Image (cartoon, grey):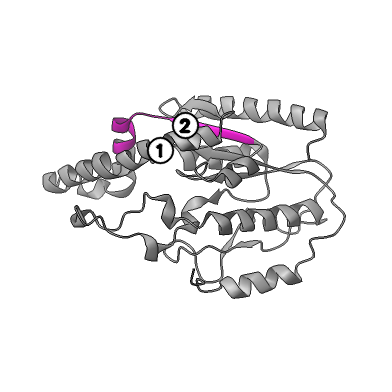
């Protein structure tokens, strides 16, 4: 496929990056998946804070290729279809994750910048997204494991990406709950526009949710050990249960030396 802006520069940077140094610590991944509106981004952010990770969650949305998000010829009024896996660059996402892992495994200090490059120019600036969380630049790293949080509604569609996650979390939520959350997040200013509210509900149910159901079985098939949690539950409960799953996984990983 045609290279997105900055991809060639990104590849050159990787060739120059020192990735063969002594590994000083283990780096693990926790994935968060589920339908749009189930609370993935909120949970991912909370987990990153709870685990005190030096980087913000990495989002699958950054790896959409807008030029591949075509309109449904039968429903052109819905606009480009962002719900299909064919429009996601899973290979590049995996490559970016591997790059971040290699840096965090070997460096003595958190870099000032650790940029993630993705093809979605609607979300990712040309220079990339700096993953380093506030207060972390230049902070010394010890030998303790580091967790990276990754999230996306098609996260486990790719078997390679799913297998990279040491902990897989899946948020279950029903259509009505997700519809209302998505509307409140993206279109609440139009809540008094009855025609638009009806249009939004039709699109969510007949486009977004139909595609979610279409790919759900494959995702869960690729993540057979996923911890399934209720997305409608209070955030603190979902965070607590997620943290328990991560702690249990870490104990097993350390016992078996799977680093």
- Write the residue at 55% across / 33% down: 169
Q: Position of residue 221 (x, y in %)?
A: 51, 33
Q: How crowded is mark 2: few (under 14 residues within 10 Å), some or many (20 or more)?
A: many
- Badge 1 marks a residue whose secondary structure is loop
The magenta stretch is 167-179
Residues at badges 2 and 1 in contact (C-beta under 8 Å)? yes
Q: Where is residue 257 in the image (x, y as percent from the top left)?
A: 82, 34
- Write the residue at 40% across / 27% down: 232
Look at the image and say whether residue 214 sits in the magenta stretch. Answer: no
- Badge 2 marks a residue whose secondary structure is strand
Where is 29 relative to 17, above or below? above
- The residue to which callout 2 is attached is 171
Rendered image: mark on residue 35: 1
The answer to whether 100 appears left or right of 216 in the picture is right
Q: Where is residue 143 in the image (x, y as percent from the top left)?
A: 84, 44
Look at the image and say whether residue 178 sits in the magenta stretch. Answer: yes
Looking at the image, which residue sits at the far left?
195
User: For residue 18, which quarter of the picture?
Assistant: bottom right
User: For residue 197, which quarter of the picture?
Assistant: top left
């Amino acid at each position: 496929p045609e290279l997105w802006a900055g991809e060639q520069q990104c590849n050159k940077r990787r060739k120059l990056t020192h990735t063969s140094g002594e590994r000083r610590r283990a780096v693990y991944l926790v994935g968060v998946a589920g339908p749009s509106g189930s609370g993935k981004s909120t949970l991912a952010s909370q987990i990153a804070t709870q685990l005190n990770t030096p980087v913000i969650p990495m989002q699958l949305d950054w790896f959409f290729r807008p030029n591949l998000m075509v309109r449904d010829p039968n429903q052109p009024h819905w606009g480009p279809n962002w719900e299909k896996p064919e429009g996601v660059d899973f290979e590049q996402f995996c490559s970016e994750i591997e790059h971040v892992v290699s840096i965090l495994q070997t460096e003595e200090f958190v870099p000032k910048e650790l940029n993630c490059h993705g093809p979605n120019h609607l979300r990712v600036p040309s220079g990339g997204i700096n993953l380093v969380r506030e207060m972390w630049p230049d902070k010394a790293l010890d030998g303790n494991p580091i967790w990276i949080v990754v999230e996306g509604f098609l996260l486990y569609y790719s078997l390679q990406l799913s297998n990279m996650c040491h902990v897989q979390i899946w948020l279950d939520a029903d259509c009505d709950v997700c519809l209302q959350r998505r509307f409140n997040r993206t279109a609440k200013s139009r809540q008094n526009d009855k025609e638009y509210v009806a249009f939004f509900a039709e699109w969510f149910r007949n486009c977004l949710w139909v595609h979610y159901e279409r790919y759900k079985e494959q995702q869960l098939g690729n993540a057979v050990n996923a911890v399934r949690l209720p997305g409608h539950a209070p955030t603190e409960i979902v965070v607590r249960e997620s943290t328990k799953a991560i702690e249990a996984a870490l104990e097993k990983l350390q016992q078996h030396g799977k680093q």
